[in-house]
Image (cartoon, rainbow, N blue to C red):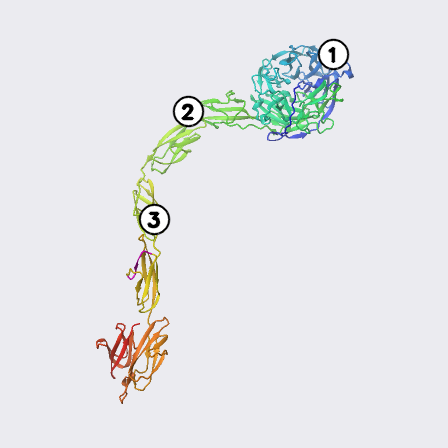
Amino acid sequence: MKTILHYLTCALFTLFFGSAHLLFAQCGSNVVNGTSTNLFTHIRNATNPVAADKNLNTIIFVHRNNAGAFGGNSGHLRYDISTNAGTSWTNDLGFLNPVNSSLGRYPNAIIHNPVNNTIPASAYLGYMAATISTVNSTWNGVVTGVRQLNGAGTTETYNQPVVAPQLIPQSMVKGAPGVYWAIDALFNGTNITGFVVYKGQWNANTNDIVWAFNYSVTPNFNTGFSNIPQVGDYHIGFDPTGTNGWISFLSHVSPGPANYAYYPVLYKTTNGGQTWTGPIQVNLNQFSCMTANTGTNVVTANFEHDLVVDALGNPHILTTICNGNNGYSVFYTSWHHMFDITQRNGIWVAYDLANVLAGRGSWGTSPNIISMDMAPQAARSADGTKLFFTWSDNSGYSLGTANNSPNMFGKALNISNWNWTPVKDFSSCNAAVAGKIIVPHVAPEVLEPSANVFKLAPVYGEMPLNDPALQANFNFLNNVTFSSTEFSLSTPSATMALQQGNPVLLCPGTTININPSAPVGDIVWSTGSTATAIAISSGSINTYSLIAQQGCLLGTLSIGITNMSVSASAPTVAVCPGQTLALTALGNAQTYSWMPGALSGTSAVITASSTAIYSLIAGSNAGCTITQTLAINLQPTPTLNVLGGTTLCVGSVLNATVTGAANYSWSTGATGSVVALSPTVNTSYSIAATSSANCAASIPFSIQVLPSPTVTASADKTVICFGQTVALTAAGALSYTWSNGSTSNPNTVTPSVSATFTVIGENSFGCAKSSSIALTVNPLPTVQIVTTRTAICKGEKQVLNASGASSYTWNTGSTTSSLQVNPLTTTAYTLYGIDAQNCNGQASIIIQVNDCLGLSNLESSLLFYPNPASQHLFVKGIQLKGITMYDISGKCVLQVNCNADNVEVSTAELPEGVYSVKINSTLGVFTRRISILHP
């Protein structure tokens, strides 16, 4: 056996169909079979000692004789039979080869059931076994024969099909009705050098299988590593019709992959074995689900496998994929999984069935040692639509544990819909069989004991003394079944896409290559081509399809081919530069580009420029293009100019005028060529204009707003009395102009009434701003001296009463409002009054002192006030006729004619001074003196 190198590694859990491997326990039970002198009869994984026939519900198992129990020798062959699907057995029947001229080893079995027979006893057991010399125990041929299951009609023939040199015939299977097949290795005494195929034909006349040579091949083995061929086990299989058949072996042939590893190698027939073609070497390195788990190691198959061919004629190779050392050895302490490697539609794919923990198990002591790896066994339903895979492992192992306590695991596939069952553990849940499934063999065909139930026929060995050289017992593992409803897990598919896109658009008269968008392995096109890319031409086939392997899966793709057609149009109206224009493309192109402008789409909106010609470039995923040109009616753009200046003082108005177009729209909302603008800060405007052809243009226009001075007006006082002056002062500008016309600063004014004065200040930019200040002019109080008489006799007293102000001061110094006087001579009295606004007024009165020498004092009834007077002089008497005033020069300055008792004389226009007043009345003429004072 091959060397196993042990390295520590981490266990990896793989995924199957997007989820963790599903595992279900289904307890099998053991049913006792026959015995043998030793277990060696059963140790080759590729022999088929168990056969089953679903129409007869019958199983047979051929094994070597137990000489200690039944006599004879261990080269005699016996068989066990069950006609109720393994529920009960009849064991150790035979001998099958009673002559035993050469000792039988590693038997194979088939059941030949005559047409329309339903009785098990009328069927035949066919057998084939390698033989060794009774003299020197060397391999010397094969023994073949039949026995009717009723125990009669035994035949025994030696070396009928042999092509020397031979090794061990194995993998005996059914082909077409009445046709049987087996494969042997060509052996030079040291190495396997090739293979030979045996074909058996049922002879109804002799009721025997006549075997003959069919085909031999000596592959070009790769001997670069050790100068010898590296070969694992070998198989043959056919579909239910016997038309499509395959030879398989694990080896490494040239030309082929560079890594020194085991690969499935196959030969095939599609005409019932008349001709064979090959070798077909499956390069495991194409499967990413394998290479992703080997790191710096190499992908390799294990040393054992099994082969089954489905109803479609596709082979299924069941084997363990391992980490290899690039020297034909494996690391069981690294990732290894059970795989179904199959061909679908001519494409190789690999389905990861389950994680495997076991390493190689072994029993016995040297030289009597047997070993077992995973013991992969494959079977199918009679119609080939259901496939069943089993192997040995133990879920309690750590990675790489020797497989000395093996359980049987299984998984099944329905090729009608490519649905799988979960993985089943058939033995660990029954202590009677748990960990005891040593060197199992499963019949290549399953039973169908009831509707929709598929029952496998596995037989395994048992060593009571744990020594393969001593008596071996065999057991049938019952209840290894699957039901139709368990095929519930769909096979994932690779997602395929075309690099060029799908469907493919071709330009008229073009040819392109199409290929998948992602790397693929094997590929088959609907044209029959197996190249990665194929050439297609417009006007030819309009539908293609491909099937390709990607990663470990199979993907399919249907591809449509369409000829591209394109037309383009543009509006005929005039268009201006900068305006948008909708260009329209019609057709089935996949991309549309418009130049200039690099626009895309079937309805591209362009902005017209100086270019009046536009091009439409229509493209396809095939890489070809169609180009069309379009002319547009391009109008000139108006040239705009703005007049009116670019600066103004804040608060001012600038009349801007734009020329160059027919219609204008300002950003302010105004229209027309002339717009009054009065921004308060620096402002940018835009003017949109259109020509008579409706072409648009715009121009920016900015106004710099110059600052106005911050002018303030102040006064030394804002409330004065009539006749007072005020100093007005302006600040904040360079020059000033007052509302009274003055340009002085300060500006002195004497307002007669309350008034507001405004000053306009101008800064260095020529910008002006005004400020105002209000002055309140309070009138002078009307101070009066009221007395009963102004003429008194000497020695008399007179009371003078003040009115019209808030406080008073007399020229006598008195501050009372009532003053009693006793002048000796005619005396003038002046009263000074101050009102609530602190304004001054005065009045004067003359008290005439008469000697009163017997004359009637007629003027005693005459009132004359105020004195001094300011604005008005009041005269009260009896029948006044006229009043005349004279200045100190004797000039008449005022004359009033009247006929009243009370007269008011205006003195506001008279200059200040002392005047003589002549008063005429019916009582006489009186003269008084008065002073005029203006506050």
Mark number displayed over residue 98: 1
Residue 306's quadrant in the figure? top right
Mark number displayed over residue 704: 3
Q: Quadrant location of the C terminus?
A: bottom left
- Magenta span: 733-740
Identity of the amino acid at label 3? Gln
Mark number displayed over residue 508: 2
Q: Is residue 447 left or right of residue 660?
A: right
Dot 1 alpha-carbon crowd within 10 angstroms: few under 14, some 14 to 19, many 20 or more: some
Residue 334 image position (x, y, % from top left): 63, 26
Mark 1–mark 2 Cα distance, whole angstroms, equals 80 Å
Residue 781's quadrant in the figure? bottom left
Mark 2–mark 3 Cα distance, whole angstroms, equals 65 Å
Element type at mark 2? loop
Please count the marks in the image. Answer: 3
Dot 3 alpha-carbon crowd within 10 angstroms: few under 14, some 14 to 19, many 20 or more: some
Q: Is residue 196 left or right of residue 914?
A: right
* Residue 838 in view of the camera: yes
Upstream in the sequence, badge 1 or badge 2?
1
Q: Quadrant location of the N terminus?
A: top right
Identity of the amino acid at label 2? Pro
